[in-house]
Image (cartoon, rainbow, N blue to C red):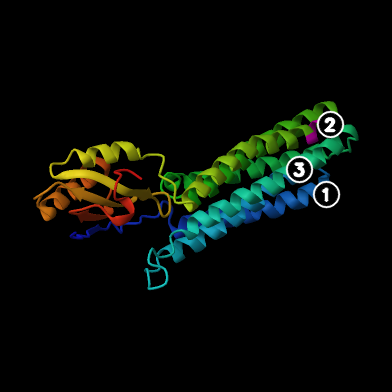
Amino acid sequence: MSANYSHEHAHDHTKGASASSLKMALGLTGVILVAELLGAYFFNSLALLSDAGHMFTDAAALGIALTAVYLGQRPADDKRTFGYRRFEVLAAAFNAVLLFVIACFVLYEAVGRFFQPVPVQSVGMLVIAAIGLLTNFIAMRVLAAGRHESFNIKGAYLEVWADMIGSLGVLIAAAIIYVTDWYWVDPIVAAAIGFWVLPRAWTLLRDTTHILLQGVPDSVDIQVIRSAMEEVPGVQSVHDLHVWSVAGDDVSLSTHVLLVADAAAEAVRLELMTLLRERFHIHHATVQTEEEPCDEHAGHVHP
């Protein structure tokens, strides 16, 4: 048996949002967080408190995202051969859990206030909500460019987007209360924000957990890759095929390839690497060629 290993690396790990953009969004979020907390206390608004809770997770997400930018730039070492890029995924998972906890707390409080409404100062609530809406819109625009390239930025973007919708809901609630004195509208809007955020938090948690479990990226069909590789002349079968992502914006692959008799291992390897790169856009791959099956795979072709 001959073993032939090949690695191709793509290290252009572009950050979707620059550190300066994250700092700007974090500053805006911090200001409105303080304003909403003060407003929730002085104006007795659960809807403002709900929005402030989401704003807190925004600030946490942005702070962690900013940390991830710097950690992600640190080079790999002998202990962390993939570097620190997975910190982004861990941070996004943490933010999703925070969203769940705060949304559940708001829902609990909303039930009590619905049956026992409390007076709300609608004018102050209206002003704070308007400021929050504008601030969230600016922060969302700042983060928009990187939401498709980083799970951490995506998490921060989703939370800011949720808060913008939340601020709009608070604004509407404040207007209704001002006109009608229907104080029960406040917990209704707070609960609506919580229910609106929960499925988005679940989606983020599901996606990050999938990466942490080394799952195959959604953009990849592993059976299509296997079939394409087995169609390359000189390849008898492909086994131990693994495809995963480190941080959500990359794809890595490793596999064993059993060759037909008298196949030129190096030529087959090069063709396989070209196939993976050009057809499937996989630039980080490890291919081991074999002239006879591995002992653990003797007697069968696919795992």
Name which of mark 1 and mark 2 comes first in the sequence: 1
Residue drawn at point x = 83 percent, y = 36 percent: 111
Taking the spot 65% from the left edge, 35% from the top edge, the residue there is 196
Q: Nearer the viewer, mark 1 or mark 2?
A: 2
Residue 78 picture location, percent across and down = 38, 73
Mark 2 or mark 3, which has the lower sequence index? 3
Distance between the alpha carbons at the discs numbered 1 and 2: 18 Å
Q: Residue at x 51, y 48 (%)?
A: 208
Residue 274, position in %: x, y?
Answer: 18, 47
Whole-angstrom CA distance, mark 2 to mark 3, is 14 Å
Instruction: Tell me the kind of residue under disc 1.
Output: Phe
Work out whether 189 lies above or below 299. Answer: above
Region of the chain picked out in magenta, as a range: 183-187
Q: Counting other residues with Cα less than 10 Å from the Cα at mark 2, is it few (<14), some (14-19), or many (20 or more)?
A: some
Q: Is residue 219 left or right of residue 293?
A: right
Q: Amino acid at mark 2?
A: Trp
Which residue is tagged 2? 184
The residue labelled by disc 1 is 42
* Pick the front one: 164 or 288: 288
Q: Is label 1 in a helix, a strand or a loop?
A: helix
Residue 142 can be seen in this image: no
